[in-house]
Amino acid sequence: MREQPVVLITGASHGLGLALARFLARKGCYRLVLTARPSSLERFEELGFSEGPTTLLQGLDVVDPQSRSLAIDAVTARWGGVDVLVNNAGVMTRAVLEHITEADHLRQMRVNYRGPMELARLVLPGMRARRSGRIINISSVGGMMAMPTMTVYSASKFALEGASEALFYEVRPWNIRVSLVQPGFINSDGVERIAYTGQSRAEHEDEHSPYHAHYFHMETFIARLMKSTRATPESVARRIARLIEQKRPPLRVSGTIDAFAFSMLRRLLPRTLYHELLYWALPGISRWGRELAQSDEKRE
């Protein structure tokens, strides 16, 4: 890559994106393009970031084709293109399949899958011309093992992983490396930003809902794990920074120790046993579906 690589980070105004931006800024050897939705750009000033010789603050809505093109054009005009693309922006919605509308479905797919791949498509011509580049897609444990109440989120991350794997082979002849970072549970405020659909919120709050136990136990379980884990946005950011500097980065990288453990479990166990084990390990699984049976009895 160039002597002072240009690194574009999506979703850089909070969480993992912010931690990575701060870490790379301290290293002082990169030109940073920090992006956020146009309505959130003012957050950068509050967080201590400002425009300068090595920093570009850029509004970017990853689902808007015009916004994507304008952002890449701005970087190309200023610094000649992107050397490292970190697709970090993402959304997570908690909902079982029955509680997802088409609009809910499309939003997650556009943000978590299509947005990152379209940005990769826009930066690839410049990377091919320079015969170097890095595309780092932030996936999730949910991209290798699906979780109940996260149906479309898991689908979007599985899609991101499949497309990234194909891209890994396609662009390697030009010395462009594609990597997937799979964080597991991170001790952050991320659990507070998990959204619900209109119906999943109502069903979650209704103790008589057939899916109430699904939502209640999964929400409690995930919140407890996120609060107890030692992994932080900063520790995952350091892992990504090492990946950027690695001469031959692998396709998949576990971002946290639990992600590595799940990966090994998936590799070592026969698939049928693996799924049965995870099913019976689900929190409060003995109560799942019980509310539905009780509701049916009352109607009879």
Image: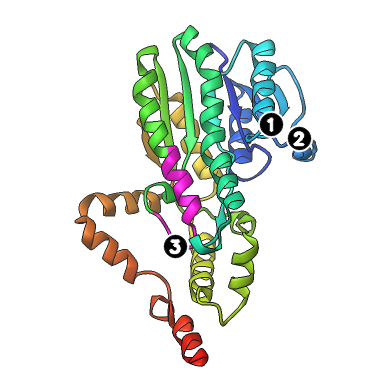
Q: Nearer the viewer, residue 296 or 48?
A: 296
**Residue tagged 2:** 38
| Vertical arrangement, residue 210 with respect to residue 271, above or below | below
Image side of residue 239 versus residue 198, left or right: left
Query: Main SS of the magenta segment?
Result: helix
Residue at 75% from the left image edge and 20% from the top image edge: 52
Disc 3, SS: loop
Q: Nearer the viewer, residue 288 or 41?
A: 288
Q: Amino acid at mark 3?
A: Pro
157 magenta-colored:
yes
Disc 3 target residue: 148
| First-in-chain label (3 vs 2) | 2
**Residue 255 percent location from the top left of the image:** 44, 44
The residue identified by callout 1 is 60
Whether 273 is among the magenta residues is: no
Furthest-top residue in view?
A: 129
Toward the viewer: 205 or 80?
A: 205
**What residue type is disc 1 on?**
Leu
The x, y position of residue 38, in whole percent, is 76, 35
Residue extent of the magenta highlight: 146-160
In the shown orientation, is residue 17 left or right of residue 77? left
Q: Residue at x 41, y 32 (%)?
A: 164
Q: Is residue 183 visible?
A: no
Q: Which circle marks residue 50 in the picture?
A: none
Compared with residue 162, is residue 173 higher up or lower down, i.e. above or below? above
User: Is 66 on the left-hand or right-hand side of 51?
Assistant: left
Q: Secondary structure at mark 2?
A: helix
Label 2 environment density (alpha carbons within 10 Å; few <14, some 14–19, many ≥20): few
| Cα distance between the residues tagged 2 and 1 | 6 Å
Q: Are marks 2 and 1 in contact (CB under 8 Å)?
A: yes
